[in-house]
Amino acid sequence: MLKGKVALVTGAARGIGRAICENFADCGADIAFFYASNDSAAEECKASVEARGVKCRAYKCDVSDYHAVEEAFKSVVTEFGTVDILVNNAGITRDRLVLAMKEQDFDDVIAVNLKGAFNLIKQVYPVLARKRSGRIINISSVAGLCGNPGQLNYSASKAGLIAMTKTVAKELAARGVTCNAIAPGFVETDMTKDIAQSAPLADAIPMNRFAKPEEIAALASFLASDRAAYITGEVIRCDGGLAM
Ligand code: NAP
């Protein structure tokens, strides 16, 4: 489905990002991925992707740093020749009720989740526009659709990502480039391991369980493929019915 394509996935050493890299690799894509600091997780992800018979490079790059992204993106293009698919997946949480939320909590989350996506889109936009084809997939959240107590910063970043998705989709549609968002509910990753242990959240989900990262990745692979050529500006929930 993705043979001959080069995919760049951010925040991909662990969790949903890693599952997306593996699923894309299963579909034949070569993979470049960015991670923040966890070198051993990045090594494991790279090995797992390479074992699927495709090329893979890991780049330690903080997506919130515009100039670092610019440099890392140049390295990706030098190494792979181009980029066909961008997945903005890197994300963090700093959860607190508004009363306790610090300015830094707000700034950190917006810098990674929202500005980080802008930084990557700035780089890939001219490449895809010139090629007159390509895919941008932004990993949002149901929190960006519905809001969530304790997540003012995170919800705002994910809602902003949806607005960015629709704007990029409108700007690039005529060039054959699609831009879509995936809005997961709860997914079994490091990000939710504390929540999963402390609250019976699954009861609130019609399907009564968290998603597996692979279930988000399968949707990303579909959106990245030629089969999804006429879908753009869309936000697809993958949440077991949570935000229905
Ligand atoms: P995770 O398990 O916490 O993994 C996050 C990944 O992002 C890690 O690889 C981390 O790198 C990387 N990262 C963090 N900050 C970064 C930065 N500044 N620059 C580059 N990479 C950075 O997260 P996840 O649960 O897989 O979530 C992935 C995405 O899905 C996020 O955008 C999240 O908001 C969204 N999402 C998750 C859920 C959920 O329930 N898990 C639900 C809805 C949406 P290191 O490994 O080096 O730390």
Image (cartoon, rainbow, N blue to C red):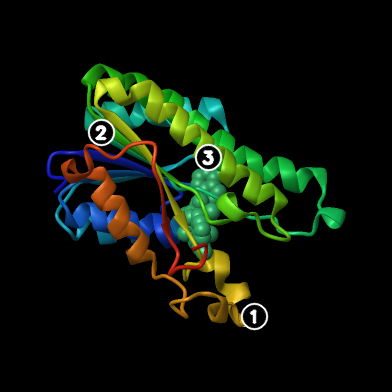
Closer mark to the observer between disc 2 and disc 3: 3
Q: Which residue is mark 2?
A: 84
Q: Position of residue 141 (x, y in %)?
A: 52, 54
User: Looking at the rendering, which quadrant does residue 18 occupy?
Assistant: bottom left
Which numbered marker is on residue 161? 3
State the residue at coordinates (74%, 48%).
105
Q: Rounded to the nearest whole Å, what is the CA distance between mark 2 and mark 3?
A: 20 Å
Q: Position of residue 46 (x, y in %)?
A: 31, 55
Q: Position of residue 234 (x, y in %)?
A: 39, 42
State the residue at coordinates (17%, 41%).
226
Mark 1 lies on a secondary structure that is loop
Residue placed furthest toward the right: 99
Q: Amino acid at mark 2?
A: Asp
State the residue at coordinates (22%, 21%).
131
Whether residue 86 is visible, yes or no, is: yes
- 15 versus 105 height, above or below: below
Q: Rounded to the nearest whole Å, what is the CA distance between mark 3 and mark 1?
A: 28 Å
Q: Which residue is mark 1?
A: 199
Q: Amino acid at mark 3?
A: Leu
